[in-house]
Structures are given as structure tokens and as C-alpha cells.
Image (cartoon, rainbow, N blue to C red):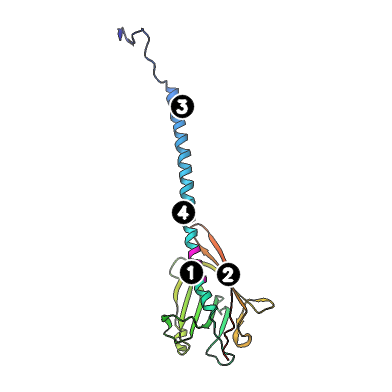
Amino acid sequence: MVATAGKRTDAHGAAPKGFTLVEVLVAVAITSMVLLAVYGVFASVSGAKQRLETDGEAYHRARVLFDRIGRELRSAYVKPSGTDTFFRGGHSNNGHPYLTLTTTAVTPQSNARGIAVVHYELIEDHEVKAGNKVLMRQETSPLNPAAQNQPGYRLAPGIEEMSIRFYNGDNWQDEWDSSSQGLPQLVEIAMRIKTAETTLPFRSAFELPVIQAH
């Protein structure tokens, strides 16, 4: 290097070249756009993964609920006479969708032997903010009618809507009472389950067997 007054030069007497301010700004702008594009792709993939996980949880909840209710419906048991066995559904006096039946699908919860009374009802969920609902379940023995007046337990919170329909062989009905109608041929249950971002609809129909006692 040869030094000259006030200026640095190389061996050929030329000043060393560097990046101008414009070139630096252009490089920074391009790098920023590339990083933003990469971040956008990452955020999109992460959001899709989160949605799949929350939707998967809703599908799992729906499958568990429908499997349980379906098992009890397929084991519905009603005597032609008497009031100790029954099958009822529709809307309660409070307007809540409900389903009550005697079934041979007994669990230890009811302490029943052979037949249990199972009651489902979708009510307002007072344990969280207003507007949310929870599916309640109760299982008791038909030999203990007083227990049927006790509150059930929280089976599934986050059920936004539920509807139940009954098929008698000719048409669908919104209300059913086995004391005058026997058992329906089909029961259709529809639910809307809340996720973190939306609600997902689920619907299934269950065929009831001919297990009416004589």
C-alpha cells in the first residue's frame, strides 16, 4: 500500500472499493423480505398444525360421546307395561334437549343390577362465562327413584348445540315417550362442539334393537 496525502490507495494507486449506502439499504430490504416470507410460511404451518390438533380433540370427544350414547341406545330396554322402564326424549320444561332411557348397558356408577336409568341433558354451564353449555349425565338404579332427582355430573363441556330426533318408521319426530309409542326405530343425535377458533358439527344415527320385554 502506498500512502498519499489524505487518501489510502492500493498498490496500483486506486482507492479501495466498498458498499455504498444505497447498496447496503437494498441488501437490508431484500434480507427483510426473505425473513418475512420465511416467518409467514412458518406461522402458516404452525397455525395449521394448531387447528389440526384442536379439531382432532373435538373429533375425539365426539367419537367418545357417540360411542357411549350409542352403546346405551342399542341396549335400551322397555317393558310394555309398568313405569319402571321407559324411553323419553325431546325438550324439557326449560327447553333443554334431553334423553332419558332404561338400558342394560350398566356401569358401576349406578349400583344397578341389570338395568340402569340414564339421563342426558344439555344445560347452561354456570361454571364458565355466560353462553356456554355443558352436557350432563346421570345414571341411577330404577329401584331408587329418589336418586333420579339428584343432579348429574359434567360429562362434556363446550357443547354449543344438541338436537335429538326419533324415527318411528314413517317420519322423524322431535319428541318421544315410550309409554304411548314404544321404542323408536332410529335415534339421531346432532351436536356442535366448540374448538379454540370455531365449532364443528357432528351427527350420527343409532338403530335400536328389539329388546322390549314381555
Tell me residue 1's x, y (percent): 30, 10
> Could you tell me what secondary structure mostly forms the magenta stretch?
helix
Say what secondary structure mark 3 lies in. helix
Query: Circle 1 is placed at which residue position?
Result: 64
Is mark 4 in CB contact (under 8 Å) with mark 3? Answer: no
Upstream in the sequence, badge 4 or badge 1? 4
Say what secondary structure mark 2 lies in. strand
Query: On residue 50, which mark appears?
Result: 4
Q: Amino acid at mark 2?
A: Ser
Is mark 1 in CB contact (under 8 Å) with mark 2? Answer: no
The image quadrant of residue 16 is: top left
Query: Circle 2 is placed at which residue position?
Result: 204
Residue mark closest to the camera, 1 vs 3: 1
Q: Which residues are magenta?
A: 59-66
Tell me residue 142's x, y (percent): 48, 88
Q: Is residue 171 above or below residue 34?
A: below
Say what secondary structure mark 4 lies in. helix
Residue 87 forms part of the magenta stretch:
no
Upstream in the sequence, badge 1 or badge 2? 1
Say what secondary structure mark 1 lies in. helix
Query: Circle 3 is placed at which residue position?
Result: 26
Badge 3 local density, few (<14 within 10 Å), some, or many (20+)?
few
Q: Is residue 206 above or below residue 10?
A: below
